[in-house]
Amino acid sequence: MPALPDGDPAPDDGALPPSVADGADQRAFGVYLHVPFCRVRCGYCDFNTYTAAELGGGASQGSYARTAVREVTLAARVLDEAGLPQRPVATVFVGGGTPTVLQAADLAAMLAAVREAWGLAPDAEVTTEANPDSVTPASLAALAAAGFTRVSFGMQSAVPHVLATLDRTHDPARIPDVVRWAREAGLRTSLDLIYGAPGESLADWRASVEAALATGVEHVSAYALVVEPGTKMGAQVRRGELSAPDEDDQAAKYELADELFAAAGLHWYEVSNWARRPADACRHNLAYWRGDDWWGVGPGAHSHVGGVRWWNVKHPRAYADRLEAGLSPATGREVLSAQTRTLERVLLEVRLASGLPTSVLSPDGRHAVAGLVADGLLEPRPALDRAHPRVVLTRRGRLLADAVVRTLVA
């Protein structure tokens, strides 16, 4: 698992500086709820998640919802004392881990606490992640009845040998069923895919994309596999048991996916995300990319409000202990400088199909735009529109997004 970032110590009471209230009425507010449990750890995963065997007797899935509700209560107090205006929650995202290893009633209780603390906007988007083998028609119906509006299934692949390499345990034949169950419950659906796994051919990847599209899903996320140090897969690659992902292979698979998604009526709105309609985009993730405010609940969760970013202790037992003692679970934080906030805005908004206003860039960055257009990395028309010039990536530019950012901020 990655280490927590460096930063200043967070105060035990979680208090935020008054500056976080500046301009808050112009920013959306969302809540992320982290569920740090999985039945099995996937070989490529370096998220802050734990199996029952890893936790031993130190932390309980059964009591987790009550612990998370304590942080929601603390968050409401901290934001009120910092002078932030009362804002209904625009988006809630329950991630993990595998949130649906908890009972639907536990997820409902966590959402109810958010609703009680701040209220939900009338059109609030409420998403949970789920593994295909961790839901039933009844559990999905219960989530919809509790106020969830959307579910994101970790499909990853439709090919059994690829799933085996990734240590995924679900039957790929179950994917159409869970999408149908979610739709029957009134939930919008998304599927997550991973490309570039060792041993995955281009034909394998095509089969996975086509299987996802055959469900009629409204939203797809597709991510290139990254082999992280400290993971099981990282050790397998280091020992030569598995081959490392190939960048050219991953680029070819990205291009194929983009072509297939577009032909099926799904359009990219962020480098790794496609939606059938603008209303089908994940609004919670858009809030991250646009620098809005969010409170992250749970061990290892990160938060950002008004230019202050902080993160919680990682282990579920340490997290629960601090909340039981009446303390904030935050362990470190940083106040972002204007320069850092601008840099992060460039880094994130460049990835969006809506693009980045060139007015955000430095004079050198604006000067670099013409060269990036000439190199085929930026779309010419948005970039050169004199009334509202914006930086918008081409498909080739999406493959080289990090290089584009480096050029724009150099």
Image: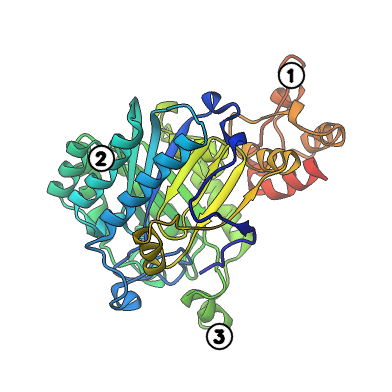
- CA distance separating discs 3 and 2: 47 Å
Please give the name of the residue rendered at 35% of the width and 55% of the height, measured from the top-left corner. 155
Residue ID at (33%, 53%): 68
Front one among 223 and 35: 35
Q: CA distance from mark 2 to mark 1?
A: 46 Å
Residue tagged 3: 239
Asked whether residue 260 is in view, the answer is no
Judge whether 61 appears above or below 238 on screen. above
Looking at the picture, does residue 394 appear above or below residue 59?
A: above
Determine whether label 2 and label 1 are within 8 Å by CB.
no
Give the x, y percent position of residue 276. 41, 31
Residue that badge 2 annotates: 112
Determine the residue positioned at 30% across, 55% down: 99
> Tag 2 or tag 3, which sits nearer the N-term?
2
Q: Earlier in the sequence, mark 2 or mark 1?
A: 2
Q: Dot 3: what SS?
A: loop
Using residue 17 as the reference point, say whether residue 388 is left or right of it.
Answer: right
> Circle 3: is it few (<14), some (14-19), or many (20+) Cα within 10 Å?
few
Disc 3 marks a residue whose amino acid type is: Arg
In this rendering, position of residue 172 left or right of residue 261: left
Q: Nearer the viewer, mark 3 or mark 2?
A: 2
**Residue at 60 percent of width and 44 percent of height:** 308
**Label 1 Cα crowd, 10 Å radius (few <14 / some 14-19 / many 20+):** few
User: Tag 1: residue type?
Assistant: Asp
Rendering coords of residue 248 (x, y %): 63, 59
**Residue that mark 1 sits on:** 385
